[in-house]
């Protein structure tokens, strides 16, 4: 019994899409500090979730630094855990 499959669709060419600019490189920030609340708020959604690398344009090392800093700031009550 042969299974009929639909012909595979070719992926669309990605035209005009620019890579995200790294906000930490633009601001010349080498280390993310948990006390810098204004910077950390740029990496948090309105619901209080940490935004992904794909959205923020950070490197993997910077994303880990941001995640640790956000978690520390939440523990120190500088940032809310959730936003209603």
Image (tube, rainbow, N blue to C red):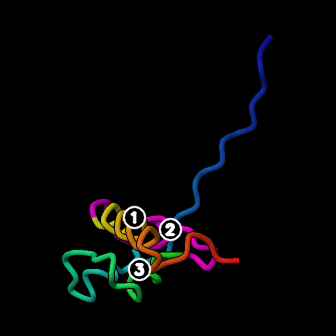
The residue that mark 1 highlights is 67
Within the image, what quadrant is residue 34 found in? bottom left
Query: Label 1's element?
Result: helix
Could you classify mark 2 by the number of other residues whose Cα lies within 10 Å: few (under 14), some (14-19), or many (20 or more)?
some
Q: Is residue 38 left or right of residue 81?
A: left
The spot of residue 78 in percent (x, y) is 44, 80
The spot of residue 70 in percent (x, y) is 41, 70
Counting residues from the N terminus, which is met first, the one under dot 3 or under dot 2? 3
The residue that mark 3 highlights is 40
CB of mark 2 within 8 Å of CB of mark 1?
yes
Within the image, what quadrant is residue 2 found in? top right
**Residue at left 46%, top 76%?**
43
Residue at the outermost top position: 1
The residue that mark 2 highlights is 50
Query: Label 3's element?
Result: helix
Q: Is residue 31 left or right of residue 1?
A: left
The spot of residue 49 in percent (x, y) is 56, 68
Q: Is 26 or 45 nearer to us in this picture?
A: 45
**Residue at left 64%, top 77%?**
83
Q: Which residues are magenta?
A: 45-61
Q: Is 13 or 69 nearer to us in this picture?
A: 69
Number of callouts in the render? 3
The spot of residue 17 in percent (x, y) is 48, 76
Counting residues from the N terminus, which is met first, the one under dot 3 or under dot 1? 3
Position of the C terminus by quadrant? bottom right
Q: Which mark is residue 42?
A: none
State the separation of the CA atoms marked 3 and 1.
Answer: 9 Å
Question: Is 48 within the magenta?
Answer: yes
């Amino acid at each position: 019994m042969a299974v009929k499959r639909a012909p595979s669709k070719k992926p669309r060419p990605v035209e005009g899409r620019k890579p995200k600019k790294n906000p930490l490189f633009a601001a010349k920030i080498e280390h993310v500090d948990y006390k810098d609340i204004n910077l950390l708020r740029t990496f948090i959604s309105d619901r209080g979730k940490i935004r992904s690398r794909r959205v923020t344009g950070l490197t993997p090392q910077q994303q880990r630094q941001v995640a640790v800093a956000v978690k520390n700031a939440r523990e120190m009550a500088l940032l809310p855990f959730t936003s209603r």
